[in-house]
Image (cartoon, rainbow, N blue to C red):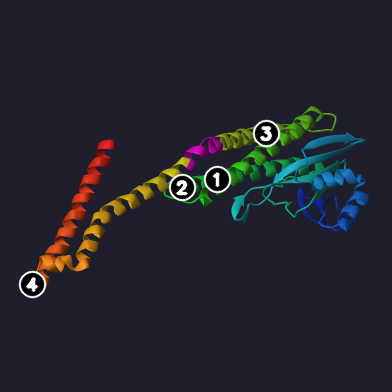
Amino acid sequence: MTKSYKIANRQISESNPEDANIVIYTCLSDSDRQEAIVQLGLDAHDVESALDPDEISRIEYDDGRVFIIWKEPLQATFDQTLRFDVLSVGILLEPNRISFVTSADTIFFSPREFKGIDSPLDVLLRYLQSTIRHYLEHLKGIKLITAEIQSKINTSMENKYLIQMFSLSESLIYYTNAIESNELVMTKLHVNSRKQGFTEDQQDLLDDIRLDNQQCSRQSQTYSTVLSGLMDARGNIINNNMNLLLRDLTLLNIIFLPLNLIAGIGGMSEFSMMTDGMDWRLSYALFFIGMVALGWLTWVVLARMLKRRH
């Protein structure tokens, strides 16, 4: 699938393929890939790299053309566990044209972020900036989700919340790797900016994007370190909750153990023989009161023993 856009009046609008200087190739089939290879003049390896989610970010220069593999965050998915994944995007920058090759329809040119556009190079810089903002929004969401899961873990005795924490920790590792990989691309782009004809405003924007990416990288590393460092502690919380439940169940068993013994003995007609001549309503009322008193006394003794230990 192909989408075509053009730059007009410093804005991006949809266009027919003949007038387009911005093209997005969403390669979902083999025929789409072959079309991208033919139209862009790339080899099959470059197109496959752009569609490989595990490909490392890189930048290549060739006869006035710049080819970039860039890592972009995907929308969160929930399949038993919540996951945040990354996607590879191939970007071919030419003097009067920019093309994107991706395996998912994730590239949108919002009027708020893509305004004041004069050239395909402006489109590239704004796209890089929007990607970093996307990462920052996801990191903020991960932080909020982690806090919510933490509050549930404090009272939970199941592993499902802990498994979600492991999934978020894995997502943060991929995010950190992708953000740091993108940083290398921007560094090389900055080094060759004068050769590529960057204006002073474009140079300043690239510097701002690099600073935002560095901040995003530090934030991702911090979240990943905190999340992985506290993982064992959160697992111990679940184990402790289970131990407290088992302790309470054990206390109940100990309280009812002598009561069951006495009730079993009384059920063999000995109680009726011992209370012969007494009104059965009074005898059973006294028996019930005695059982309650014995259970309460057992509870008090056990509670004092536990208090002494603590």
| Separation (CA) of disc 1 from disc 2 | 10 Å
Q: What range is drawn magenta here?
A: 226-235
Horizontal side, residue 90 vs residue 159: left or right:
right
Residue under numbered circle 3: 208
Q: Is residue 119 visible?
A: no
Please state which of the two labelled residues, at mark 4 or mark 1, is closer to the viewer.
Answer: 4
Horizontal side, residue 172 vs residue 151: left or right:
right
Query: In this orientation, which residue lies closer to the viewer: 256 or 226?
Result: 256
Q: Quadrant of the N terminus?
A: bottom right
Kind of residue at badge 4: Asp
Looking at the rendered structure, the secondary structure element under dot 1 is helix
Overall secondary structure of the magenta section: helix
User: Disc 4 or 1, which lies upstream in sequence?
Assistant: 1
> Cβ–Cβ below 8 Å for labels 2 and 4?
no
User: Disc 1 or 3, which lies upstream in sequence?
Assistant: 1
Q: Residue furthest top?
A: 191
Looking at the rendered structure, the secondary structure element under dot 4 is loop
> Cβ–Cβ below 8 Å for labels 4 and 1?
no
| Separation (CA) of disc 4 from disc 1 | 64 Å
Query: In this orientation, which residue lies closer to the viewer: 273 or 140?
Result: 273
Q: Quadrant of the C terminus?
A: top left
Residue under numbered circle 4: 279
> Cβ–Cβ below 8 Å for labels 1 and 3?
no
> Cβ–Cβ below 8 Å for labels 4 and 3?
no
Please state which of the two labelled residues, at mark 4 or mark 3, is closer to the viewer.
Answer: 4
Residue under numbered circle 1: 165
Please state which of the two labelled residues, at mark 1 or mark 3, is closer to the viewer.
Answer: 1
